[in-house]
Structures are given as C-alpha cells and as structure tokens.
Amino acid sequence: MLHGFAAPLKNAIDYLSEEWAFKPIGFVSYGGVAGGTRAVHMLKEVVTALNMVPIREGVVIPFLQKYINDQGDFEPNDVIERSADTMLQMLTR
C-alpha cells in the first residue's frame, strides 16, 4: 500500500469508536524510507474526527526488514526502543 492505511484498519477504528472516544492513542508505524509516517498523518485526522486523542509521540520504523534477525524476530535499535518508551509513558499519563 502506498502512502495510506488499510481499509480493515479503518473498519476497526470505526467499530471501536464509541469505546475509544476521548482515549489517548499512540501510533507505531513501519515501512520504507518514510516509515509509515504518511499513513499515520492520515490516521490522526480520522481518529481526531472520532473524538480520540492522538499523542504526538510515536514509534517510526523505517526499512523494517533491517530489524528482522535470521530467526525472524524483531530487534529494535536504541532509537526505536527510546521512542517506544516515551510513547508508552505519555499514554499512561
């Protein structure tokens, strides 16, 4: 998918919009050079319109495949780990 998000994700957000209204939401995105940031930008508009509260902090994983080891496990670098910690701290506030 180029520069967007999947229809099943939009369907899930719509389905849970009442339960998630006024709740903070963080994003973890992955992809090529932009790491999924274009899709997150579009999703922030969608969730805001549904009264969800996107936080500024997020996790961006560009070139996902370089973080997959020979066993198929995800191995994040320090930047990804710190951004995940920061996002989780903001979500728990």
Image (cartoon, helix red, strand yellow):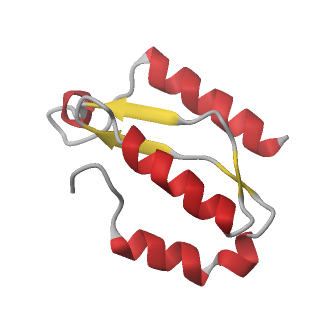
Q: Quadrant of the rendered structure where residue 31 is?
A: top left
Farthest residue, direction top:
78
Image location of residue 5, percent across then percent down: 36, 60
List the single residue furthest toward the left.
70
Image vertical order of residue 91 relative to residue 1, above or below: above
Q: Is residue 89 left or right of residue 82?
A: right
Residue 18 versus residue 29 in the image, above or below: below
Give the position of the C terminus as an image quadrant. Answer: top right
Residue 84 appears left or right of 39: right
> In the image, residue 47 lies at what x, y percent?
62, 62
Is residue 41 or residue 27 the one in the foreground? 41
Position of residue 52 in the picture relative to residue 32 (left or right):
right
In percent of width and height, residue 69 lies at 20, 31
Residue beneath the point at 68% across and 70% down: 50
Residue 62 left/right relative to 24: left
Q: Residue at x 20, y 42 (%)?
A: 72
User: Which residue is at the front of the view, 78 or 56?
Assistant: 56
Tally of numbered discs: 0
Question: Residue shown at 50%/76% (left/top)?
Answer: 12
Q: Quadrant of the N terminus?
A: bottom left
Q: Is residue 16 above or below residue 70?
A: below
Foreground pick, 72 / 76: 76
Residue sitting farthest toward the right: 93
Q: Residue at x 38, y 43 (%)?
A: 38
